[in-house]
Image (cartoon, rainbow, N blue to C red):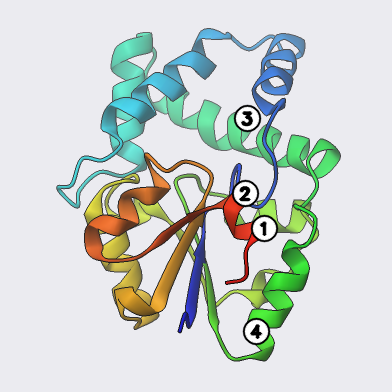
Amino acid sequence: MTTTYIFDLDGTLYNRKGLKKRMILRSIAAGRPLSMLACERSCRRAISGIDTGTIGYETLFEAMSHKSGKSIEKVRDWYNNWYMPTMVDEIGKHFPLREGLMERFLSYRQRGAKLAILSDYGCIREKLNALGVESNLFDELLDAPSLGGYKPAPCVFKTTLEILGSKPEDCLMIGDRPERDGGSVKVGIPFAEIEDFMKGSY
């Protein structure tokens, strides 16, 4: 019986279709270089899955700095003070919580199950707030880079299990990207794609 539900956030708690386009439009409107959006995506892909336990936000910023030719300070400022706050703002304005998810959260809580968020991005609390979800519904809000890697790195899922005090066979990882979120199976945590999860009984 599943006693711990671990949810990815972006693309899982909400359908992120159209977010990329909106971020591009916001970047143009703010006079920000579009190249930084592409740089963030490509650098994140390049370091995703590295399983040394030492891959964090600064690793991403260093990679982006090298690729873009901008200083780490400017990259960090762009990410923390424009990119993430703008994403949170767009989510709050245009991307609602998936229909039926709140009912699932409350049902799991009522039966005593643990709930956690495991995201490759930060600002988890702010994004939940933008989606109208109380963060205290969850036992843990975990961003993978703070755990030493980006999904599908096994170290991320192993550390998540340690923090939650849960056995892998008692957990379920729910996400929208099998190639990343599905990395949970490498440490014995079953994976369910969000569309299948919402159709089934878990």
At numbered mark 3, what does the secondary structure look like: helix, strand or loop?
helix
Residue 151's place in the image compared with 140, above or below, is: above
Residue 15's place in the image compared with 64, above or below, is: below
- Work out whether mark 1 precedes mark 4 in sequence or the reverse, and give the earlier one: 4
Given this view, does label 2 or label 3 mark the residue nearer the observer? 2
Q: CA distance from mark 1 to mark 4?
A: 20 Å
Amino acid type of the residue tagged 2 in the rendering: Glu
Q: CA distance from mark 2 to mark 3?
A: 31 Å
Relative side of 51 to 110, left or right: left
Given this view, does label 4 or label 2 mark the residue nearer the observer? 2
Residue 120's place in the image compared with 4, above or below, is: above
The quarter of the rendered structure image containing the C terminus is bottom right
Q: Quickly name the residue at label 4.
A: 109
Q: Residue furthest right?
A: 93
Residue at 34% over, 32% down: 60
Question: How many residues crowd around disc 1 within 10 Å: few (fewer than 14), some, or many (20 or more)?
Answer: few
Amino acid type of the residue tagged 3 in the rendering: Trp
The quarter of the rendered structure image containing the N terminus is bottom left
- Residue 199: assigned label: 1
Where does the image place residue 119, in percent across and percent down from the top left?
48, 51
- Work out whether mark 3 precedes mark 4 in sequence or the reverse, and give the earlier one: 3
Q: CA distance from mark 2 to mark 1?
A: 6 Å
Given this view, does label 1 or label 4 mark the residue nearer the observer? 1
Residue at 32% over, 38% down: 58
- Residue 195: assigned label: 2
Amino acid type of the residue tagged 4 in the rendering: Arg
Q: Are marks 2 and 1 in contact (CB under 8 Å)?
A: yes
- Work out whether mark 2 precedes mark 3 in sequence or the reverse, and give the earlier one: 3
The one nearer the camera, 33 or 165, is 165
